[in-house]
Structures are given as structure tokens and as C-alpha cells.
Amino acid sequence: MSDNSYLFRRPPHWKNHVLGQQSCLPDDLQSWLDESGSLTRRLRGLYGRQLRVKLLFNCWKPAFIDECRLLDQPPARYQLLREVLLHAGDKPLVLARTILPAQTIRIARRNLSHLGSRPLGEVIFAYPDLERRRRQFSLAEPGNWSGRPETRPAREQAVWGRRTLYAIHKQPLLVAEFFLPGFDV
């Protein structure tokens, strides 16, 4: 088990998003993987108040090395790692992992460090200067996931995800979202 993730034993392999090279993405998830607005807002449009966030992991630890590189952070530096499950009733929808460097939290006036079960999207998309810098995709294999039943995708299959590097007031944060099997909205 990884001590810097509740979701992953090891990080997934990510590929850069290149416009026009999305033929490998599944048709039923294409619009979700390419969503440029708030995933939370879009899910709320479908599920309303049924959409909930279950906090799985929220602590200051070093992130995975590839995450540190993308955020331009030293690998040993502690960052706020937050992992959640978005669900509607008993239907699991999305597993998400957010990496928040200390400077980003300071510049955002600590709004990002006390989210609890509030969706991150409701906070970051309220910032007028939110900037999307980079998008990557991954097909996370069953061996990537932790052995915990509540976070392991059903039927031991690969799960599509996206990872987005954002900036608030020029300070980076990284958000990865994985669409669980049975995601059929």
C-alpha cells in the first residue's frame, strides 16, 4: 500500500491530451473526459442533491514524483493530498485525487484546505482567474488501485481518467478524476 494515497498502490501512467488524437477514448466517456467546465456542476445537473462527496484521504504528504514534476514542486515537499468518491445514493461515479501545494492554498486564502465533503469544483470554478494549463488521460489498470474494496473499481477492470493542471492566481493545483465502471450518464 502507498502511504501517500488511499486510492493507488502506484500512480497511473498518463498521456498528454493532444487535440484531434482522442480516438482511443471510449465514445461513452468522451464528452466527460473532455469536459472543460466543472464536472461537479455537470453531475449536479443530472443528480441534483443526490450527488455527494465521501472524503477518503485528506492529509499533508509528499505527492507521487510525476505529480511533483507537473506541479514544479520538490518531491519531498509536503502538499495537501485529497482523495474523494463522488456518488449519487449508493451509485459510485467518480474517484478523484487533488494535489494542493501550500503556496496555492495560501494564495487562495485557505478556501481549499477546509473543503470537507464539499466538492472541489464548487470552489475552484468560482475563482475568476482559474486557468486550465494542461490535460492528460490515463487508463488505470487494476494493479494501480489499492486493495481497499470501497475504492477498487468493480470487476477488476481498467478505468479511464483525466488529470488537469489548473492555476489559481498563477499557483498550480492538480486534479485527477476517474470514471468508475457503470458510469452511464
Image (cartoon, grey):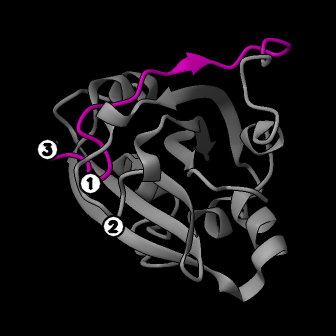
Q: Residues within 10 Å of mark 1 (few under 14, many from 20)?
A: many
Please indicate whether residue 144 sits to the left or right of residue 171 in the image: left
Residue 30: quarter of image: top right
Label annotation for residue 56: 2
Q: Of the two numbered discs 3 and 1 on the same chain, state the one appearing first in sequence.
A: 3
Q: Which residues are magenta?
A: 3-21
Give how far across and how far down residue 160 sits, in percent: 58, 36
Which residue carries the number 3 mark? 1
State the SS at label 2.
strand
Q: Main secondary structure of the magenta part?
A: loop
Q: Amino acid at mark 1?
A: Tyr
State the SS at label 3.
loop
Give how far across and how far down residue 132 sits, in percent: 70, 37
Q: Of the two numbered discs 3 and 2 on the same chain, state the one appearing first in sequence.
A: 3
State the SS at label 1.
loop
Q: Residues within 10 Å of mark 3 (few under 14, many from 20)?
A: few
Vertical position of residue 3 compared to residue 106: above or below: above
Please indicate whether residue 130 sits to the left or right of residue 101 in the image: right
Calculate the distance from the C-alpha at mark 3 to the C-alpha at mark 1: 8 Å
Label annotation for residue 180: none
Residue 18: quarter of image: top right
Residue 99 at least partly seen: yes
Which residue carries the number 1 mark? 6
Q: Of the two numbered discs 1 and 2 on the same chain, state the one appearing first in sequence.
A: 1
